[in-house]
Amino acid sequence: MVSSFLVNKHKPWIETSYHGIITENNDTVILDPPLVALDKDAPVPFAGEICAFKIHGQEMPFEAIVLNKTSGEGRLRAKSPIDCELQKEYTFIIQAYDCGSGPGGTNWKKSHKAVVHIQVKDVNEFPPAFKESMYKASVTEGKIYDSILQVEATDEDCSPQFSQICNYEIVTTDVPFAIDRNGNIRNTEKLSYDKQHQYEIMVTAFDCGQKRAAEDVLVRVNVKPVCKPGWQDWNKRIEYRPGSGSIPLFPSIHLETCDGPVSSIHTTIELQTNYIGKGCDRETYSEKSLQKLCGASSGAIDLLPSPSTTTNWTAGLLMDSNDMIFKFDGKQGAKIPDGIVPKNLTDQFTITLWMKHGPSPGLRAEKETILCNSDKTEMNRHHYALYVHNCRLVFLLRKDFDQADTFRPAEFHWKLDQICDKEWHYYVVNVEFPVVTLYMDGTTYEPYLVTNDWPIHPSHIAMQLTVGACWQGGEVTKPRFAQYFHGSLASLTIRPGKIESQKVISCLQACKEGLDINSLESLGQGIKYHFNPSQSALVMEGDDIENINQALQKVSYINSRQFPTAGVRRLKVSSKVQCFGEDVCISIPDIDAYVMVFQANEPKITITGMDHFARPAAQFESERGVILFPDMRIVSTVTKMEHSVDLREHDRVNKQVVVEEMLHNLDFCDVLVIGAELDPEQECLELDRGELQGKHLDATNSTAGYSIYGVDSMFSYEQVLRQLRYRNWGTSATSDRKFRVKCSELNGRYTSNEFNLEVNILHSSNSNFMDHVNHMIFQPKFLQSVQHPEGSVSAVHSSVVPSVAMMVIIICVSILVLVVTLGVLGSAPRASTAPWGTRDPRTTRWTGMTLLSPSLSTPWRNMKSHTRQKRRVRKKI
């Protein structure tokens, strides 16, 4: 009985494999099938009981325990919490052991090996996290994108359910973007760079367990403007200050081609100044002064002068006085008085004019007369005329029978677009009969049509020269104007007997502003360029974009006028490109910019000198007369505001007025007689013609005064005025004369002060007294100094007039001298010789005279101001 009890015949039995699941962070393993071991020795004690389950494997975090030895039931559990993120599943071997053959466990048996596979069940403990702290993307405006960028989040959970991201969401509201489950962001509408340059949106993520990301991510989307081919980095406004010389227009400009296959580029830069003066900034001197300055032949007759007492035929015309422009509205004409233009112009003469004219109304418009010489009465013959007809310029010249009784050229026609473009152009008609040449803006044009006609029959009918319309003297009940002009004219002159050269014509119409290129030698290779004659347009061509960029950066604006016309100058840059083998190439938009020319500081022209002197009658009666202005000075100053920092006064910025002397030209100086005009029977103003030689000056003389004109320096005008003499060979009827001098720059744009001079003619009764007084009077000081602070501005002006104290001293001395002189004369014999000279009884002329001229008031000086009586040129020297 005992021996049979100790027998252990059979091994325990378990399943061959087990599958288990353990929840993360838990120790209980659920096995399928359950862990149960069987032994056929049962119910034999010990041999039929299960005492242990043993796990084979290195450092397995599991253990198996026996729950019931008799039933063989066991349990698998974790030694410590299992982390799925460290290991998702485990596989190991397990065996069951019985209790042996007795209480000591001897002679035990073990089961076969079974495989246990355990999966760790994940817990959703980790939220999604984005891979980047911020996302950036750029889009081009005007496009819809399928995907702008993709955001991506991850989850540290181990299971697919909790480690996968199932959804993304845009947190920011009211933005034109959407996101899909894969994190792709797209725009829901076309974006505009002008509307918004950049968008910032917040995005979150959800895993498949619907756990939300702990932190949302920022997505920044930049909107780029559409790459538009065109010029970049240029300023619409360019500022120009007078005297700046040449300034670059586009120093940083470059061309954006958007990677277009550009093979060459053609660029045109236009300076649009048609609305400035007569088409651009030109010198605004009178036509006569300009012709003198340009070296034109003398003898030009101005048919549209400023209205005056001697040139009154333009008084009724519409006029822009600043630019000497006459506007004709189709209702006005002007008759040129007889004798202004000679009847016979000869076979050589020149007509010059500025004209602005638009299209004529109607299909066959009437002739529009610029200049016409026709019969004054009885008949209606046109001897010569310049007119516009259907946008053609026509010059008519009918010869007289006494010159040639042959069929000869009579009408010369030019067809030019500029005649009716409503812009200013300069026309010169050079007549060398039978050849007539037209110059327009300096370019030569031959007539496209010349028609012949018979000479005009001789008659004794007087002719009438007109401007703006043609005089119809016959074939009507009452003579009247006809064929009116519609447009604007200026500087209309006719020069009989001579024609002008191309050089003079170019000078007369030259612009003083234009385009320029700084450093021509530095232009890149392969750059071709061309200026138009007035330099208002520049064309550049090249096949290298970088060279074109550099060339355009060197284009500049220049205005050589000392006093330019202030205002806007429009700029237009147009470009055309060609591409390599492309039918369609990129288009470059035009540039519209402008140059703002600032107003120049206005000069103050000051004439100084002695304003009162007396001379013996004999000097006025002499052959040379008396020089009127021996010490005349003409000085021009400008007043500027300067800024300086005064550290002693709490860094306060003070404005300081600074007066600077400047040099510029004058274009005329008038010496006017105040009071009664000169009596040509006994007095005159004289100037040696040689004083004008070597200068751009001319002069005219009349009983109203003397006019010196031409564009020249103030120094040249000083030199000439200092030689102007006054003669009076009938002094017995005259005791004094008053003169006034006034000078101009730019045809009256800037004028000087009115300098008044009083001259006294001394007869024998008062000569002795004046000799002493004249020697005691001090000479005036002239305007000096280049710069003066604000406090001393008045000192500049006061320097031209003696001080009040000096005047008081001189008057006192004069009275003292008068008393002494009267005493001496009373005690001296009548026959005694005058102390300051001798008298020749035969000629009544004083000899040995050396009088100094007083600069201050004398007892007989008249201090009243006089109204200017400007009477211009009537008689040539």
Image (spheres, helix red, strand yellow):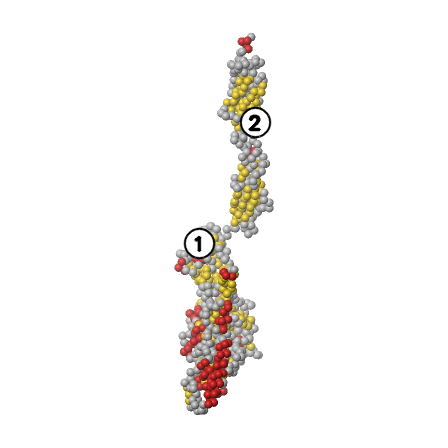
Query: Callout 2: helix, strand or loop?
Result: loop
Q: Secondary structure at mark 1?
A: helix
Out of 341 and 637, give the one closest to the viewer: 637
| Residue 13 seen anywhere in this rendered image of the structure | no
Q: Is residue 541 above or below residue 750?
A: above
Task: Determine the CA span between mark 1 and mark 2.
Answer: 77 Å
Which class describes the residues within 10 Å of circle 1: few (<14), some (14-19), or many (20+)? some
Which label lies toward us, 1 or 2?
A: 2
The answer to whether 349 is drawn above or below residue 22 in the figure is: below
Q: Which mark is residue 184?
A: none
Q: Quadrant of the N terminus?
A: top right
Residue at 46%, 90% in the rendered image: 827
Between residues 279 and 770, which one lies in front from this camera angle? 770
Q: Is residue 538 above or below residue 479?
A: above
Closest to the observer: 166 or 209? 209
Residue drawn at x 47%, y 87% as measured from the top left = 823
- Assign the C terminus to one quadrant of the image: bottom left
Tell which residue pokes out farthest to the top in this image.
Answer: 1
Q: Position of residue 863 (x, y in %)?
A: 52, 79
Going by the numbered disc 2, the residue's amino acid type is Asp
N-term mark: 1 or 2:
2
* Residue 819 in view: yes
Label 2 sits on residue: 27
Q: Residue at x 44, y 72 (%)?
A: 713
Q: Amino acid at mark 1?
A: Ile
Q: Position of residue 538 (x, y in %)?
A: 45, 61
- Which of the 4 image quarters holds residue 836? bottom left
Dot 2, crowdedness within 10 Å: few (<14), some or many (≥20)?
some
Q: Which residue is mark 1?
A: 545
